[in-house]
Amino acid sequence: MMRLKALGMYYLLRLLFASCRFKITGLDRLDAPSGKQPLLCFWHGDYVPLLPLMEDRGGCIISSQSERGNTIAGIAEGFGYQSVLIPDKPSRQSMQQLLQSLQSVSAAGTAVDGPLGPYRKVKGGVIWLAASLGMNLVPVALHCRRAVRLHQRWDHLTLPLPFTTIHIAVGSPMAVPATLSATQRRAIADSISEQLLFLEHGARQGTLEGQLDGQ
């Protein structure tokens, strides 16, 4: 039943995205020869419009082991992503599974405030993942010119309307040390939040073309 739900949602989204225009700024940052894989980080409520970003580019979606996580994984797989479901408290086995999956992809992505919020509050899990896996954090934000936002959900999920323009902005890679103090974790979390808000504002105003190079 869950797979059928995900499959149905995938086909609806495929039809929707076929009518939309995508404008992406900073996509080349995912190809930068930094020696480290990028871990895309974004607000949970933005995951739907972001699905086409890494299509056919060998991406991996990291979700929680839950009914909602399974649905997201099923939808993402339709768009050509690999998916890995990890528990809220990852075990050595789940981390080994994740490492194995990352060997065959160019980038991974996960929500910074997921899986259950609070809304737009960067949690430590994404920072811990980047530190443990030796990945660079890459903030990604967006703005849909016309969209419905489901405010009854904790994440205020954004659903683009047909024939709209979706602006996606990819920020600068952020290196994360393998060992972090509590102060460093808070500083990185604050930096991620600031970058996401900056990128979202720039995507909304259409002012990012000249600014991203100077970040």
Image (cartoon, helix red, strand yellow):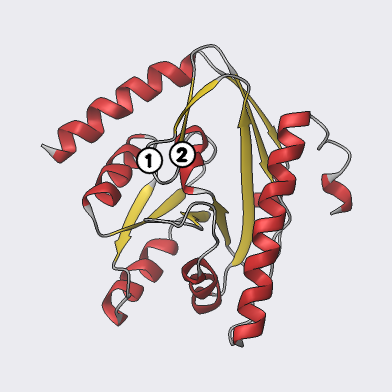
Residue 71 % position (x, y): 26, 43
The amino acid type found where label 2 is placed reads: His
Residue 17 % position (x, y): 47, 21
Distance between the Cα atoms at labels 2 and 1? Answer: 5 Å
User: Is there CB contact under 8 Å for labels 2 and 1?
Assistant: yes
Relative placement, left or right, of 103 versus 27 is left
Q: Is residue 32 visible?
A: no
Relative placement, left or right, of 202 versus 80 is right
Residue 28 % position (x, y): 71, 45
Relative placement, left or right, of 80 versus 5 is right
Position of the C terminus, as image quadrant, is: bottom right
Residue at x-position 63% and y-position 32%: 143
| Residue 177, picture quadrant | bottom right
Q: Residues within 10 Å of mark 2 (few under 14, many from 20)?
A: some
Q: Is residue 199 visible?
A: yes
Q: Say which residue label 2 marks.
A: 156
Q: Say which residue label 1 marks.
A: 153
The amino acid type found where label 1 is placed reads: Arg
Residue at x-position 55% and y-position 71%: 127
Q: Does residue 121 lie above or below 13 as drawn?
A: below
Relative placement, left or right, of 90 versus 192 is left
| Residue furthest to the front | 152
Secondary structure of residue under mark 1 = loop
Position of the N terminus, as image quadrant, is: top left
Residue at x-position 82% and y-position 46%: 212
